[in-house]
Amino acid sequence: MPGLYRGLPLYAGGRDQPDKNDRKGAGSEVMSRITAPLLSLFIIPAAYKLMWLRRHRRLAA
């Protein structure tokens, strides 16, 4: 059917597919850029410290 691209109507400018600069999925990209530093700053060191404490408490007991 003319005017449809993969089951979707034409975009407003008459384009049949979005530009590379369209921001679909930008939220997930932002979240991944935020999540990775948080993991390296807080989660991984906290997990290491918990494992370290558990190991040393067993040795002290």
Image (cartoon, rainbow, N blue to C red):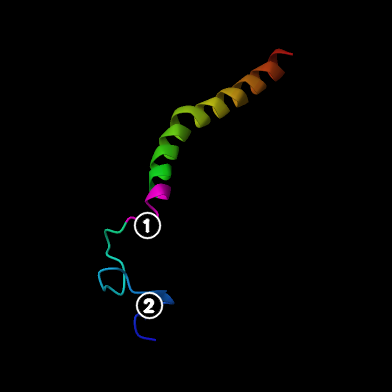
Vertical placement of residue 50 versus 31, above or below: above
Please tell me the numbered disc located at residue 24: 1
Q: Position of residue 41 (x, y in %)?
A: 44, 28
**Quarter occupied by residue 20:** bottom left
Q: Residue furthest right?
A: 61
Viewer-closest of 56 and 5: 5
Q: Secondary structure at mark 2?
A: strand
Residue type marked 2: Tyr
Q: Position of residue 40 (x, y in %)?
A: 45, 33
Please tell me the numbered disc located at residue 43: none
Q: Which residues are magenta?
A: 23-28
Q: Position of residue 24 (x, y in %)?
A: 37, 57
Q: Position of residue 26 (x, y in %)?
A: 37, 51
Residue at the spot 50% in from the left edge and 27% down from the top edge: 45
Viewer-closest of 30 and 22: 22
Residue at the spot 42% in from the left edge and 77% down from the top edge: 6
Quadrant of the rendering where the N terminus is positioned: bottom left
Q: Residue furthest bottom?
A: 1
Question: On the picture, is 46 further left or further right than 6?
Answer: right
Quadrant of the rendering where the C terminus is positioned: top right
**Residue wearing tag 2:** 5
Question: On the picture, is 40 further left or further right than 60?
Answer: left
Question: On the picture, is 51 further left or further right than 60?
Answer: left
Vertical placement of residue 41 versus 61, above or below: below
Question: On the picture, is 14 further left or further right than 2?
Answer: left
Vertical placement of residue 32 versus 1, above or below: above
Residue at the spot 41% in from the left edge and 38% down from the top edge: 34
Q: Quick one: label 2 or label 1, which is nearer the N terminus?
A: 2
Residue type marked 1: Lys
Q: Residue furthest top?
A: 60
**Quarter occupied by residue 46:** top right
Label 1: few (<14), some (14–19) or many (≥20) C-alpha neighbours in 10 Å: few
